[in-house]
Image (spheres, rainbow, N blue to C red):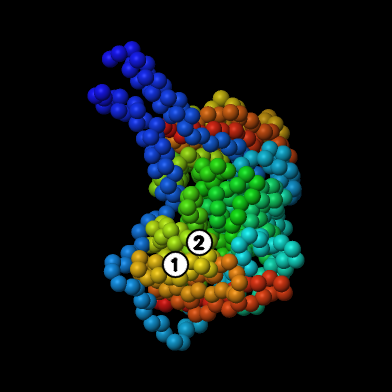
Amino acid sequence: MKRTIKQLLAVQWPVLLLVATLVGCTPDDNGGTGGGGNNNGGEYVAPEVPETPVITNLFRVDFFSTLGADEPFFSGLRDAGLASQFVGNQASPKSIFYLFDRCDFEVGKGTAAVKIAYDNKANAYFLPSETTGEHYTKGTGVVSRYKSSSIVGVAGDNLHLSGVSVSIGLSKPTTITLFNATFDTTEQVAAAVEAFGVELQSDGVLLAKVATDKKGDVEEWLKKNFSGYRVEFAGSEGTAYDLMVLCPVMYVCRSIEELKSINLPYWKVTMEKFF
Amino acid sequence: MSMKKRVLTLAIVLLGTVLTVSAQRSVSLRVMSMNIKEGGRYCGFLSAPYAELIAQYEPDVVCLQEVDQMTTRNGGRDWLNEVAMATGMMPYFCHSMNYQGGGFGTALLSRWPFYKMTKIVTDLAGAREKRASGWIYVQLPGGECVRVATTHLALESAQMTIQHLADVNKNIFAEGDTIPTLLVGDFNANEGSDPISYAANRWKDLGKGYGNTYPTSRQEITYAAQRLDYVMASPKTGWTVESYTILDCPDLSDHRFIVADLTYTFPNE
């Protein structure tokens, strides 16, 4: 039986519809700038950094996390009030960002980050790490004394990644975008680089949780597919995730210290920007 | 073509149509517009009366204007975070200018997390103050995304109101013009004025025919009734107004507030 084009289209319509829907569902419409330099052949090696830091170009980010898989950070004896006190009592130099991993958002209750910000006359932001739920959405609460004029981000099926931009005073005024995400697969890292590679090679710093068993794969993927960056990892024994600090080559992560404030585990990340 | 083949072709076409219709995506949300008059002066700068009103209507997004943040006149109150905590919403303060030791501007509150946000400050020559507009990208349960903006346009002249709106348009549409978008707030322009005619180039006025928004019943004798507050939508097609209510709250503001239930149906792909 010979079919006309119309008949063929009619038969294939549902299939075409499905394909179009799938294409339409890719995380393309929600904000990424795209880009990012691919490493064409060979493995990328970041250039050496000066041994001695320039003190006025150092800044600090505190990342509160158990690096666990399923538990909200403020649960059990870990109380948001203690986090408020920590932020309020911190001696100079104060951190530019306090990140609270799994400081989840509950409909009608919000996120504890707002209370922490309120207690300290600061600003609260929330970076979702999954598709918005009917009642509950996992994500990271961010508290900063700096007002942000933008959050960039993508909310796709495979990746949720957002970054808060603030202007801070180092030896020169600098705008830094702090990204946060949770990576369970190398494909998600590829999607992050696809969406925000340009930022991650300029003024974007990514603090991410990476599934411990994927750390090696992620490191390899970056070496082969990305450039103009520096990366550091830190972690504890027996946790589901490691902490990854990925920054442009004009930045360096000077140290990652594992600390505790009363019963709140956190990672003190000290970074430097080169001018 | 035999009758059997014709019937088969018709059935396939019908199936395709049914699939297309059933696959058509839509998104519904409730928005509120609240110009709270000088940081909430009418009720002593308290946050609770506004939080109670918002909680009563359970909006998805609230677009606020004339918000004080930790100013002398409001007693150093972090007004927006207070409302956010009381309602469980996520706040975004759009700082227009420093004022009385704190800040003054517009703001957004969202019942759902937002993954992206932008603030712009428009500083027009001859304007008496800088004015901030801000927008958030909200992902609703189910995964659909909408963009909701708050604004408080310049009032010095119709030309300046238009210039201000042009700046908002330029910046918001630079981030894309296909995502369903609402521009909500105090346009400082009455229905039928040049700025609202200009707005119609890019936006659909969803509140047409639902009544005036200024002043409240307390000042009706003093001031002529006008429609100054709007819910504008882009793209201009695909929006349905399920309900549109003007709230008269003379103890909270000189402007009436808006509560609108809206649905956007995405075009067929």
Give the label on residue B122, or none: none
Nearer the observer, B239 or B83: B239
* Residue B28, x across and y down, in percent: 56, 35
The residue lying toward the viewer, choosing from A123 and A254, is: A254
Q: Measuring 50% from the left and 82% from the top, which residue is drawn there?
A: A55
Residue carrying label 1:
A218
Residue A168 image point, x, y percent: 51, 69
Amino acid type shown at disc 2? Phe
- Residue found at the very far top of the displayed protein: B3
Q: Is residue A101 visible?
A: yes
The quadrant where residue A222 appears = bottom left
Q: Position of residue A184 (x, y in %)?
A: 51, 61
Q: Is residue A27 above or below residue A72?
A: above
Q: Quadrant of residue A62?
A: bottom right
The C terminus of chain B lies in which quarter of the figure?
top left
> SS at mark 1?
helix
Who's the residue at 51% across and 39% down the image? Answer: B182
Instruction: Give me the chain letter of mark 2.
Output: A
Quadrant (top left, top right, bottom left, bottom right) of the N terminus of chain B: top left
Q: Residue at x 71, y 72 (%)?
A: A263
Give the number of marks: 2
Residues B46 and A125: in front is: A125
Nearer to the camera, B41 or B69: B69
